[in-house]
Structure formats: C-alpha cells, structure tokens
Amino acid sequence: MGSQQRLGTAVASAVLAFALGHPAAAAPDTDASIRVAFRQAYRDLGRPEATRKELKRSERLFRKVIVALPDRPGGHRGLGLVLRRLGDCEGALVALKRYEEVLRERSPDVAPLPAATSARRVCESRRRSLGADRGGVVVVRAFPPGGQVSLDGKPAGRAPVRLAGVKAGPHLVRGTLAGHTAAQAEVVVKSGGIVTAALRHQRLATLELLSAPAGALVTVAGERRGATPAQIDQLPPGPQRLEVAAAEGDRPWVGTVAALPGQALTLSIPLVAAGGEVEIVSEPPGAAVTIDDRPVGHAPIGPNLLSPGPHRIELMLPGFGLESRRITLAEGQSQVVRAELAPVHLDVRLRGLSEDLSVSLDGELVSADGEWIRQVPPGWHDLAASRGGVEVWARRLRVGTDGGNELRVDAAASGGVSPTRGVRRWGGLAAAAAGLLAAAALMPEPGGGIADYAAPAGLATVGAAAAIVSIVAWTESGASLRAAPSPRLDR
C-alpha cells in the first residue's frame, strides 16, 4: 500500500472515529438514514483521491445532516472541510465558524479538532492574500476589430484583447485603426475584477476641395492641408473649421465642413477680392449649404465675400425640409441669411372609420369621424385602433426623413368595420345553415310530386343567398388593415 493510501486510510479512520465517538460530535442516532448519510459523507471526505463529484455528494449529505440536526457540530465541521477541498473558502469559513460556536455551546471544555483549525487558518490566509492588490482584467473590444490597443500609452496588442494583471485604479485604453478615427475609453480596475473597454472607431471621410481661382491655401481645423485643388483623405467626422485663402495674408473664406463617417465630400469655394459680405446660419446648425449650385460647406459659414449681384442659397439637413433663399448683394453690403429648418412630417390618412372606432397615435386618443388626417414628425410611432376599450389593430411605423411621406390606412377592414358588416357576416352564415338544414328536413320521400319539392327548394335557395351575403361580408373585411404607404415611407 502506498504512503498516500495509508495516509488517506489513517485520516478516514481518525475522522470517522471523531465523527462517531467525539463527545461533542457524536453521530446522530435519532434517524438511521441521517446516520448513514453522515458516515458516507465522512468516508468520501477522508479519501485523498476522492473526485470532485464525490466531494459534491459529501457536501449535499452534510447539508442534509445539518438540516436534520443543526445543533450537532459534526455536520458543520464536515461541511467546512469538504468546502475547503472544493475551493470554496468563503463557504468553508462560515461552516467552520458555526462548528466552533456549536461545539462551545455543547462542550465548552472541548477544543476544536486540529483539522478544522488548520482548514480555517488556510482559508483566512487565502482571504488576506486575495485582499491584497493582485490586479484585475481589462477586456478590450473594438468596433470594427483589428486595431492597435495601448494601455496608459503602452502597446497592448490588437483588439479584441484580454489584459490580465492590470493594477487596480483608473486607466486609459486607446485604440487606433487605419482609415478610422482613434477611440479611447477610461476604465477603473478593481483588484480581482474584470472590466470591459469598448472602442468604437468611425471611418474617416474624404474631402475634395476646389476653388476659383485655384492655388488657394487650405486650412482644416487649424492644420494646413495644401493648396487647391486639394484631396484630403483622412478627414475626421463631425464639424471642422475650414479656411481657404487665395494667398498668404489675404482674407480667407471661413466656413465649416461636417462630414459623416466614410462620406466623400466635394466643395467648390468662390474666392473674390471685393464685393458684398454674407453670413449663413441655420437652426439647427450643420445644414449643407450651396451657393449658386456650388457646395461650399456646412452652416455656419462666414461672414465671407461674394461677388455683387443675385445669388441663390440653399440649405438642406437630413430630417428637415429644404430651405431656399435668393439674395442680391451690392458692393460693400453685408447680409445675414438665417434659416430655421422645419422638420419633415408624415401625413397619416385613415379612411372608412366606423363611429365606434377609437384611434390613438403614440398613446394619444384621437376622435375619428370619417377621414382623419394628421401630421407626424420623423421617427418611430405607434398607431392603434380600439373598440370598447379593446385594441383591435396596431401598427408601428417609422416616418422617413426625406419628406413627402404619406400612409393611407383603409379602416374598413377587420378592426375598423361597422357593426352592420358584422351582422351580415355572422347573420348570413347562420341563415344559410338554418335554410339548408330546414330544406334537408322537408325533403319528401322518393316518388313524390313536383309540388312536394317546392318548399325545400325555396329554403335551399334562401340559404344559398344568405351564404353568398356572408361570404361577401367576410371578403370585404379581410384579415387585417390594408395600408398603402408611398415608396418614401421607411416602415
């Protein structure tokens, strides 16, 4: 027999002897099944080669003993020892503390057994070591993935990446990806904890910049970007200050360029040495501006010089209507073009509403009589119809942002039908069934005269007519409301 087996046998014998014979922890004798469970649990616990499955079984058995006999220390001690072997030190400490309390209550002069004291000491030491700063884990995820990651300025691999052993405290995670904006996130790491840093990169936009005359100096966000015609391949999304000057020291054209992620923009800047002055402002800001059909950037723009004479200025912003203005500039004159852009709305038309049908839009009740028309702002909306407080139809629709939308709903369908149509549907069906059954009941015996068939034939005809009325009523109602949105409606 090997030394490990001999040790296991000795431990098992000692443990079982204590469990059964210790004055403060005698095995329960009130219930044979509890006694069997108690011995089986200690038998597995005393085997050094016991598998995790066997130890989990011992845990369940010890808990069963504790429920049956909570005032016996043996069950608490066994639970603490088995939890220690399973790696649950927190649970082991709770069980061993309870073991010592019960032992003192039953036998104040009996000291805890060395095995329990040793297990408790080991778990307390582990708890203290866990309390020290052993670092945490930072999981870095990037959208799109594949970029370089740095932690507090030091390279840390490519995203996605898991960084272990990071010192507790605040840290800065930064990511870079070719053709995209840099992204960063601040995280606070706790000792032994895991924190996730999400980096979202946006595709860089491109800008082609033209001017008349060519050769003008270009500055974007305070950085010189060459001379026109200029191709700027890495333009960060969002508003950037734009300056275009015919020559060094000349008064520059001042404006804003606000590109969307991945967008390709082309601007054509008119440069004049003298003329009138114009400033263009939009509410909300960021509207794309064209002057005489030439895109010049995004509001706010200017004040800048324009040649004297008439000019057409257009402003357009997604989700808002197109604003067009005509101005005439004189030499030395200054004008401000201020445009308040109106949101695009959707016209919702409901037709064929019955008088007992209630319609609500985004939870707001609308009294409907005949045809109902309402303007709805862009975004998602909930349209519902109810009768007698019971919802009979609902639809979730999204209003587009390009204008001219219209949704027509024929409410003369299922939920919106009038009561008379219901009478025709069900009444016709009942009349058809009654007529056909009566005709079958009055059918004469074979060999009867023609007069004998008159009544059944009449009833059958009435039943057939009622069936036709019912079928027509059901066909008219359909299975659901019929909607005919225009092609511009994004549902």
Image (cartoon, helix red, strand yellow):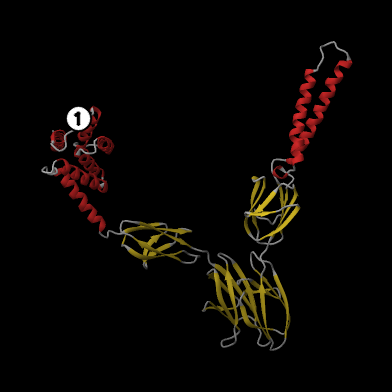
Q: Position of residue 250 (x, y in %)?
A: 59, 87
Is 447 left, or right, of 285 in this rendering? right
How many numbered dots are placed on residues in this image? 1
Task: Give the SS element for disc 1.
Answer: loop
Indicate the quadrant where residue 319 lies.
Answer: bottom right
Q: Residues within 10 Å of mark 1 (few under 14, many from 20)?
A: few
Vertical side of 13 occupied by 219: above or below: below
Residue that appears at 42% across and 63% down: 148
Vertical side of 93 occupied by 242: above or below: below
Q: Is residue 340 visible?
A: yes
Q: Position of residue 135 (x, y in %)?
A: 30, 59
Image quadrant occupied by the N terminus:
top left
Query: Looking at this rendering, what residue extends furthest in the left direction?
Result: 109
Indicate the quadrant where residue 390 lies.
Answer: top right
Query: Looking at this rendering, what residue extends furthest in the top direction?
Result: 447
Q: Could you tell me the amino acid type at mark 1?
A: Asp
Residue that appears at 62% across and 82% down: 303
Residue that appears at 21% across and 52% down: 124
Indicate the quadrant where residue 153 lies.
Answer: bottom left
Q: Position of residue 343 (x, y in %)?
A: 66, 65
Q: Position of residue 36 (x, y in %)?
A: 23, 29
Foreground: 330 or 353?
Answer: 353
Q: Is residue 164 visible?
A: no
Is 200 left, or right, of 455 in this rendering? left
Q: Which residue is mark 1?
A: 29
